[in-house]
Image (cartoon, helix red, strand yellow):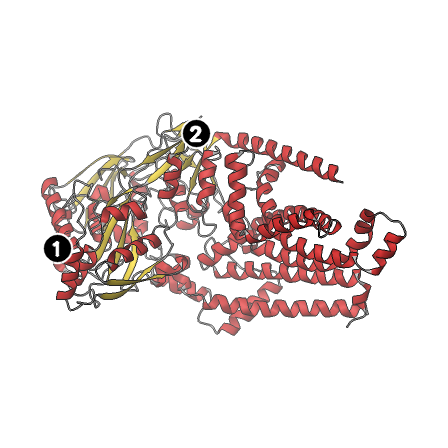
């Protein structure tokens, strides 16, 4: 009996080993990209609706935009080869790339661009694009000829091409609706699918009509997500995955020490923030807000929460690394001044506040805990309340006076506006200052780049000194690739992926 | 006589299921968050959200909605999934199938493992081997399945790369692919379940081995091994059946942790995702299926016990 059990165990082990070998060999020809999460629900292949990492991966492989943002926030040509504006920046003309075809063979023309943008303003379509593209007048998008499109804007905007690199602005065929796209997505990107059904993996094949010479670098690409960090890291080191994207700092630190893989970093990335309602006590007193900001030791924050993979932030959404930053050095911690300001504001014995957080993004909880430790030194007693991740963004965000939050990487025009303009739908600090709005709008409409930069810097300074947002750090967007693969560079913006040049041996 | 017992058990199972359906329905209604916002996304227009609320009959009284849903369930119509508008049966079928296969594999390892370890322990009871194995099972019971999954992953994927890091399976996976994908999760699940089964079976076996009829068999000259396997084990199995039935319920709904670690596209993950996305029809359908399987496996265990044990048949 024992002998039987032993031999059968041995046989099983051989079979499994063989199976692993065969299974690995089968999958060698598809590029295998793995993200940090995968939801079985709500999978979208319509660029108007992008909510999860999976959505981003699917949509960036199938569709393309007019332009793509590089790490210096300069738009680079993709489907549009060049562009220019009129004298005051109220009208922009884009010259489209010729000879591009959609994945079903039809030609890409200006009418497709017009449709792609007009449909984003359909009130029946739910999309986050509306607020980002609010300067567009949908009735004033015109196909001048087959390869020229003209946008006439509601107000002057000097950096409109940069705005068009938002993840939602991908080009879809003229007349396509969300229902159609969800079943048969058709774009101009390097990979395509014939039909889409939601599943645990997304497999796309080479687009035979793709306009990039020699691209894409593989016959097919496969996206999936593994939420457990150990499994994901093991998948890469054991050769079961080729590329890991949106890597968290702990995984990056582990992979750095592993052989056979390389860690890739963009210059910057998203930022973490703590948002205070400026119209609610105790935060309605600017001295209290300044005290709350001064307790943060920013480089220590980066070293603890982000394991050193990040940059200190200066209480505004523009990274100190950016040439547009108003100050490149990190604001130093000043506990004494914080205590003094609190005493002046009427809190000589310190302050008690509730700070909400969740593990919606893994670093949000350590961030709140580290802030609590730092604030305690100035007599601020922070009560960290961890809320469930799946309802955080509907129940807590915008509904509590002091919360932990984060925002993806954006160019200054968008970053300074999306959560801080008076009429912003996401105004997480209830900050309503007409002077700020005017300054930002003026900056966006200034054609001269140096004058524009100076205005952005003034806007940031106002927000950093008077606003209700504490930005302790920026993350660094990180990816990891196994040796034997090449042709991928992570972009600051974690929603910008370009898989057209990725190849593996 | 037996027929009345069996009927009684079936009726109580049905009543249990109905009670569960009421509880599930009520709990889903109490989940925080606006369903329309969660399903359509934060940026959806108010008109779209209103339309969804009307479509889901959210303004109708809860009892009315419950009855409508129950009627649908009984006629086999599970409804449509909110986010992809596909029939729920289409979405659940592959995930449930995967989990059933994994459960089958886990049970296939669990049964011989439990029987052999408990058998060895009972045979050499109170000796060195017995104590040693007890310690090992105690340690196994103390390690949470999450940690055990990761330990196995590190051992067999990183340190000794013989198995794949992720257990992805879909309709294209070969038989060999299935075997290698199932290996680690099935072993982990089998170990997690067996630690309880082993302790229970060992206790039962030792108790039976001390009873009179066993002494008679030994005195008659039958070998101890044969006595253990042919005479003691069948009697000791019955309580173990109950434990196994409970384990089956755990396998269907509770293995989401193991599924996440090995990235196995199973039923547990589907249930958790459905709750995260507030996909109300999918949540209700998956929880009811998990509950139905649990109740059914308990029912089967009860019925088997009645059939196998003549003593139970006289109780009513």
Distance from the alpha carbon under mark 1 to that under mark 2: 49 Å
**Residue at left 56%, top 71%?**
B67
Name the side, left or right, on which A253 lies relative to A89. Answer: right
Quadrant assignment for the N terminus of chain A: top right
Query: Which residue lies under the disc numbered 1?
Result: A438
Asked if residue A345 can be seen in this view, the reply is yes
State whether residue A304 is above or below residue A75. Answer: below
Q: Provide the chain ID for the residue under circle 1.
A: A
Q: Are marks 1 and 2 on the same chain?
A: yes
Name the side, left or right, on which A352 lies relative to B16. Answer: left
Quadrant assignment for the C terminus of chain A: top left
Q: Position of residue A45 (x, y in %)?
A: 41, 45
Asked if residue A428 can be seen in this view, the reply is no
Name the side, left or right, on which B186 lies relative to A304. Answer: right
Q: Secondary structure at mark 1?
A: helix
In this view of the protein, which residue sits in the foreground, A476 or A307?
Answer: A307
Q: Which is nearer the N-term, disc 1 or disc 2?
A: 2
**Residue at left 56%, top 60%?**
B78
């Amino acid at each position: 009996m024992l002998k039987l059990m032993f031999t059968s165990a041995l046989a099983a082990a051989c079979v499994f080993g063989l199976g692993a070998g065969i299974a690995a060999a089968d999958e060698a020809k598809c590029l295998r990209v793995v993200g940090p999460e995968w939801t079985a629900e709500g999978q979208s292949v319509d660029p108007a609706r992008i909510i999860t990492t999976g959505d981003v991966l699917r949509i960036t492989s199938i569709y393309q935009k007019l332009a793509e943002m590089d790490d210096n926030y300069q738009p680079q040509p993709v489907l549009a080869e060049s562009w220019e504006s009129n004298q005051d920046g109220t009208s922009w003309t884009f010259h489209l790339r010729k000879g591009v075809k959609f994945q079903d063979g039809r030609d890409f023309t200006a009418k497709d661009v017009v449709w792609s943008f007009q449909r984003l303003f359909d009130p029946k379509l739910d999309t986050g694009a509306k607020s980002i593209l609010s300067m567009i007048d949908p009735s004033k998008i015109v196909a001048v000829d087959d390869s020229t499109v003209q946008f006439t804007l509601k107000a002057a905007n000097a950096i409109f091409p940069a705005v068009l690199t938002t993840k939602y602005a991908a080009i879809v065929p003229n007349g396509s609706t969300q229902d159609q796209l969800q079943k048969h997505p058709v774009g101009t990107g390097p990979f395509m699918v014939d039909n889409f059904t939601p599943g645990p993996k997304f497999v796309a094949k080479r687009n035979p009509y793709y306009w990039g010479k020699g691209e894409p670098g593989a016959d097919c690409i496969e996206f999936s997500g593994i939420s457990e960090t150990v499994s994901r890291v093991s998948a890469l080191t054991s050769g079961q995955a080729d590329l890991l994207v949106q890597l968290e700092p702990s995984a990056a630190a582990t992979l750095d020490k592993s052989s056979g893989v390389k860690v890739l970093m963009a210059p910057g990335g998203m930022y973490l923030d703590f948002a205070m309602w400026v119209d609610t006590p105790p935060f309605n007193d600017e001295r209290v807000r300044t005290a709350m900001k001064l307790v943060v030791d920013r480089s220590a924050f980066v070293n603890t929460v982000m394991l050193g993979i990040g940059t200190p932030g200066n209480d505004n959404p523009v990274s100190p690394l950016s040439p547009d930053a108003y100050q490149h050095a990190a604001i130093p911690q000043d506990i004494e001044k914080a205590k003094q300001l609190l005493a002046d504001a009427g809190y000589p014995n310190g302050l008690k506040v509730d700070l909400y957080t969740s593990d919606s993004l893994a670093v949000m909880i350590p961030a709140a805990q580290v802030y609590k430790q730092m604030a305690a030194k100035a007599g601020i007693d922070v009560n960290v309340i961890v809320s469930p991740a799946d309802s955080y963004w509907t129940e807590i965000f915008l509904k509590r006076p002091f919360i932990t939050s984060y925002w993806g990487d954006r160019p200054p025009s968008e970053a300074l506006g999306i959560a801080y303009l008076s009429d912003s739908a996401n105004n997480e600090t209830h900050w309503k200052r007409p002077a700020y709005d005017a300054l930002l709008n003026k900056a966006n409409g200034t054609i001269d780049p140096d004058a524009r930069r100076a205005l952005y810097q003034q806007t940031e300074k106002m927000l950093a000194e008077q606003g209700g947002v504490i930005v302790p750090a920026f993350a660094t967007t990180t990816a990891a690739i196994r040796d034997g693969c090449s042709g991928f560079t992570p972009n600051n913006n974690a929603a910008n992926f370009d898989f057209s040049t990725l190849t593996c041996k | 006589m037996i027929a009345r017992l069996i009927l009684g058990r079936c009726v109580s199972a049905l009543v249990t299921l109905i009670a569960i359906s009421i509880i599930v329905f009520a709990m889903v209604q109490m989940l925080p968050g606006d369903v329309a916002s969660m399903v359509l996304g934060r940026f959806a227009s108010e008109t779209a959200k209103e339309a969804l609320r009307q479509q889901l009959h959210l303004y109708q009284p809860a009892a009315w909605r419950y009855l409508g849903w129950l009627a649908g369930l009984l006629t086999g119509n599970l409804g449509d999934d909110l986010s992809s508008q596909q029939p729920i049966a289409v979405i659940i079928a592959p995930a449930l199938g995967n989990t059933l296969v994994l459960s089958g594999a886990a049970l296939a390892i669990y049964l011989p493992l439990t029987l052999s370890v408990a058998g060895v322990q009972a045979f050499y009871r109170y000796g060195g081997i017995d104590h040693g194995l007890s310690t090992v099972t105690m340690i196994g019971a103390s390690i949470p399945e999450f940690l055990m999954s990761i330990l196995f992953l590190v051992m067999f994927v990183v340190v000794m790369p013989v198995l794949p890091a992720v257990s992805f399976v879909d309709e294209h996976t070969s038989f060999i692919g299935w075997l290698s994908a199932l290996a680690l999760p099935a072993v982990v699940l089998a170990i997690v379940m067996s630690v309880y089964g082993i302790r229970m079976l060992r206790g039962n076996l030792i108790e039976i081995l001390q009873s009179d009829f066993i002494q008679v068999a030994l005195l008659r000259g039958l070998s101890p091994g044969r006595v253990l396997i042919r005479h003691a084990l069948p009697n000791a199995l019955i309580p173990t059946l109950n434990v196994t039935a409970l384990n089956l319920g755990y396998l269907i709904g509770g293995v989401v942790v193991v599924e996440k670690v090995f990235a196995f596209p199973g039923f547990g993950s589907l249930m958790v995702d459905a709750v995260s996305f507030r996909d109300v029809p999918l949540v209700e359908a998956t929880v009811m299926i998990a509950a139905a399987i649990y109740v059914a496996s308990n029912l089967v265990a009860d019925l088997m016990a009645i059939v196998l044990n003549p003593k139970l048949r006289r109780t009513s």
